[in-house]
Amino acid sequence: DGGITQSPKYLFRKEGQNVTLSCEQNLNHDAMYWYRQDPGQGLRLIYYSQIVNDFQKGDIAEGYSVSREKKESFPLTVTSAQKNPTAFYLCASFDRVPPNQPQHFGDGTRLSIL
Amino acid sequence: AQKITQTQPGMFVQEKEAVTLDCTYDTSDQSYGLFWYKQPSSGEMIFLIYQGSYDEQNATEGRYSLNFQKARKSANLVISASQLGDSAMYFCAMREGQVTSGSRLTFGEGTQLTVNP
């Protein structure tokens, strides 16, 4: 079945450490997105990519980095510069045809500080 | 300014009754799309229903319908015949402008719905 796979489901980060969250999709979608969700709040856009080897900052990109070397993969690195990384991270993908298509989401990664 | 406003942090409904979750939006674009997602406690985001700004009919998907009032800029979700499994967080989201590969969604803060037996 087509879908989005995020791993790991749970991740712990030590002080000063960079960690990478994986997102893989087999939906053949061009666009991919990373969101952050804090408890009891909505989703905020971190980064998005419309096409391979291209990506744009979202609303809260500071302390994060991404790459898009393959269409199906869009990993997110939470760097040591992100001082408050504890949150739920969701990856999504999107195909603009037809126009009423929703974004499809993975099951998320919960990141905590040790 | 908030682009998506969900004014009900929490809502309660009796099983088998209908419930309306409010959503108002702010945009100057003529072309936009409105989405509702359900997020159970496990965290995944489940797409429920879509309404395009040019759609003349209110969207319906099974027990879900969208009360779209364009002049008021509101897109309320109506869940009929509530079930215990409907207990979850519900998010309203908007896509502004024409659909492109880089289309972004703006999410509201969500409404936590609890269905009581």
Image (cartoon, helix red, strand yellow):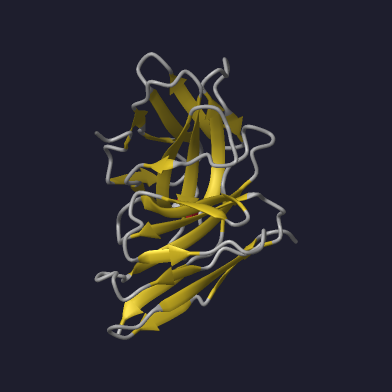
- Of residues B93 and B110, the one drawn nearer to the viewer in this rendering: B93
- Of residues B86 and A109, the one drawn nearer to the viewer in this rendering: A109
Question: In which image quadrant can residue B77 be found?
Answer: top left
User: Where residue A14 sits: x, y (%)?
Assistant: 32, 86
Which residue is painted at 46% across and 24% down in the image?
Answer: B67
Which residue is painted at 39% across and 45% down in the image?
Answer: B14
Please say if B12 is above or below B24: below
User: Where residue B63 sits: x, y (%)?
Assistant: 56, 37
Please say if A9 is above or below A42: below
User: Where residue A38 sits: x, y (%)?
Assistant: 31, 60
Specify whether B101 is left or right of A89: right
Specify whether A7 is left or right of A11: right
- Of residues B7 and A55, the one drawn nearer to the viewer in this rendering: A55
Specify whether A14 is left or right of A8: left
Q: Quadrant of the N terminus of chain B?
A: top left
User: Where residue A72 sits: x, y (%)?
Assistant: 67, 61
Residue B44 visible in the current orientation? no
Residue A98 visible in the current orientation? yes
Q: Residue furthest right?
A: A1
Which residue is painted at 59% across and 57% down in the image?
Answer: A53
Please say if A20 is above or below A87: below
Which residue is painted at 40% across and 50% down in the image?
Answer: A58
Q: Report the label total.
A: 0
